[in-house]
Image (cartoon, rainbow, N blue to C red):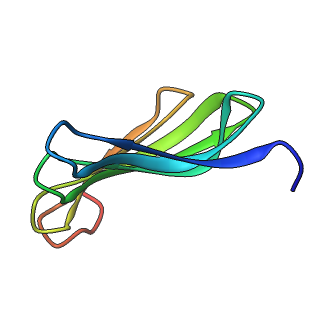
Amino acid sequence: MAGIEKVENKWGNGQVKAVGWQKNGKKLGQWKNYSSTGWLESRERWKNGNWKWSIFYNEKHEKLSWKNAKGEEKKYQSCGCNR
């Protein structure tokens, strides 16, 4: 797709910090953010540079919470299910 490029940012230690897509310098689609030790901290959804929602994870890959641009939020139990 024209103008769409994959972006990968890295921590100082070489681990991937964030990976996603952008078009004309604006974030697009799904982005994944990682800790400096390599575990997935969050997934985000972007549309035309506007943040839509995020899901946050712990080191065990369990969902902690979900937030969206409308200010709504859900917390999850250690099982990854809604509270």
Tell me residue 23's x, y (percent). Answer: 76, 37
Judge from the rendering whether residue 80 lies leftward or rightward of residue 6; answer left or right: left
The quadrant in which residue 82 appears is: bottom left
- Looking at the image, the residue that sits furthest to the right is 2
Q: Nearer the viewer, residue 40 or 81?
A: 40
Where residue 13 sits: x, y (%)?
Answer: 14, 44
Q: Residue at x 54, y 50 (%)?
A: 20
Residue 75 shows up from this direction: no
Q: Quadrant of the C terminus?
A: bottom left
Residue shown at 16% from the left, 61% from the top: 77
Closest to the observer, 76 or 5: 5
Question: Residue 17: horizontal and vertical position, in percent?
Answer: 30, 44
- For the image, the number of numbered tags is 0
Quadrant in which the N terminus appears = bottom right
**Would you say 65 lies left or right of 32 here?**
left
Q: Is residue 55 above or below residue 51?
A: below
| Residue furthest bottom as drawn | 79
Q: Residue at image x 89%, y 49%? A: 2
Between residue 61 and residue 25, name the one nearer to us: 25
Q: Is residue 42 visible?
A: yes
Relative image position of residue 14 (x, y in whole percent): 21, 48
